[in-house]
Image (cartoon, coloured by chain):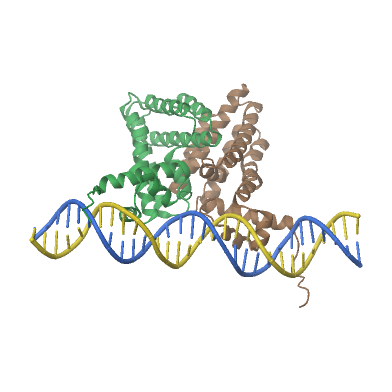
Chain colours: A green, B brown, C blue, D yellow
Amino acid sequence: MSPQRLRSNDPEGMRNRILDAAFVAFVARGYHATAMTEIRDLAGVSGGAFSHHFPSKKQLGLAVLEARVAGAVAQSWIVPVQKAVTAKAGILAVMTAIITELEGRGRVTGCPLNNLALELSGGDGDFQTACAAIFDRWQGALGVELAGTGCLEDAEKADSLAGFVIAAYSGAMAMAKSRQDVRPLRDCRDMLDQIIP
Amino acid sequence: MSPQRLRSNDPEGMRNRILDAAFVAFVARGYHATAMTEIRDLAGVSGGAFSHHFPSKKQLGLAVLEARVAGAVAQSWIVPVQKAVTAKAGILAVMTAIITELEGRGRVTGCPLNNLALELSGGDGDFQTACAAIFDRWQGALGVELAGTGCLEDAEKADSLAGFVIAAYSGAMAMAKSRQDVRPLRDCRDMLDQIIP
DNA sequence: GTTAAAACAGGATGAATGACCTGTTTATAT
DNA sequence: ATATAAACAGGTCATTCATCCTGTTTTAAC
């Protein structure tokens, strides 16, 4: 036979395709509800390549958390708040943006981190650690901004408020997902506007 | 053979045993991560009896939501707040009680409703409707109390605040579960103490 | 007392899942 | 140029899972 030359060895690209497909599927349908074959088909990857990059589902899950979920939190929350003039303005702007985006499309899929954290933190210690680390970085970053941009003097109080902001947002998103309605997020935004100094 | 006489036909008790076992397993490990055989073994029920009472896993899940999760919310949140002198005092007392109880045992399993709602609301419409109904009753009850005990005059504002309280609590519990630490709940309680009029 | 239906027992089954395995191609190092 | 390992293809395999099936016992109706 003639040489195929149809194969393009691109380990990084392959890995990213798998991670992207897994992220979408895990967030939309959940970790346990998603079969490996679904991700494989969605990414258009052979079984051999799949198991070469991710020998087990758990390793794929952990990689999705660290390489995609953490990135989504950084991109949608941490960076915008860091770039804003004040932390309060940044937080409110992020929430407004999320609400607007959700109103655009029909479906509310929820916060990727919260979705996976609640499903996985209970069972496996490694998943729990990974989720907790992302929450920690999120809260840490918001706390620094809240303390740094004049919203709050006390660093400890700023950290507590940051945790509360994340909790309120996460819970509101959970209710919004369950109801398929953005109203909980709007109410949350209005409340945070009143609360954050 | 002699008549067995070891069977005690008790449909209601059998159904309750299954629901109890399923509730524990679903909340602790999640819906999809729990196998039917686990529940069957935990409840000590034969396959025939099991499929007689709950022909499918989905029907069992819906029954757990309506018969156990809704009850847990009513018992741990709605009734205590209704009995309290003011809604604010009731809400803070409930949170204090939950924090104290969580500190007693080692493990934070999370809010039953939030755990299941986030896992199931995305995929199936029936689950989503069932979860949303429980959230609605929860928010409705808290809203009535907040409006009725002098905390807030405007009924619509009271409803929004009720939703925010539930969101903040749910999110704080999610973080507490992920971190296996009650601090998010303590911070949440302190914040709600400042916020609720 | 007879009949019908509900309540239960215990096992069987087909489908689906996660992991694995053998081969082939491409890149890298020497 | 050659050896070695990584990257990839395609299929298999054991296991687990949810459901269903046949048969027995209890309850209820008439």
* Viewer can see residue B106: no
Residue C19, percent from left and from top: 39, 61
Relative horizontal placement of residue B65, taking residue A67 as reference (left or right): right
In the foreground, A57 or B109? A57
Number of numbered discs overlaid on the protein picture: 0
Kindly identify the residue that appears in the image at 54 percent across and 40 percent down. B121
In the rendered image, the vertical position of residue B146 relative to residue D15, given as above or below: above
Residue A52, percent from left and from top: 30, 55
Q: Quadrant of the N terminus of chain A?
A: bottom left
Kindly identify the residue that appears in the image at 59 percent across and 58 percent down. B39
* Viewer can see residue A41: yes
Residue A187, percent from left and from top: 51, 27
Q: Quadrant of residue A136?
A: top left
Relative horizontal placement of residue B8, taking residue B179 as reference (left or right): right
Q: Quadrant of residue B37?
A: bottom right
In the rendered image, the vertical position of residue B181 relative to residue B196, given as above or below: below
Q: Quadrant of the C terminus of chain A?
A: top left
In the foreground, A168 or A180? A180
In the foreground, D6 or B10? D6
Kindly identify the residue that appears in the image at 50 percent across and 50 percent down. B108
Residue A160, percent from left and from top: 42, 36
Relative horizontal placement of residue A95, taking residue A150 as reference (left or right): right
The furthest residue to the bottom: B1
In the foreground, A169 or D4? D4
In the rendered image, the vertical position of residue B155 relative to residue B105, given as above or below: above
The furthest residue to the top: B154
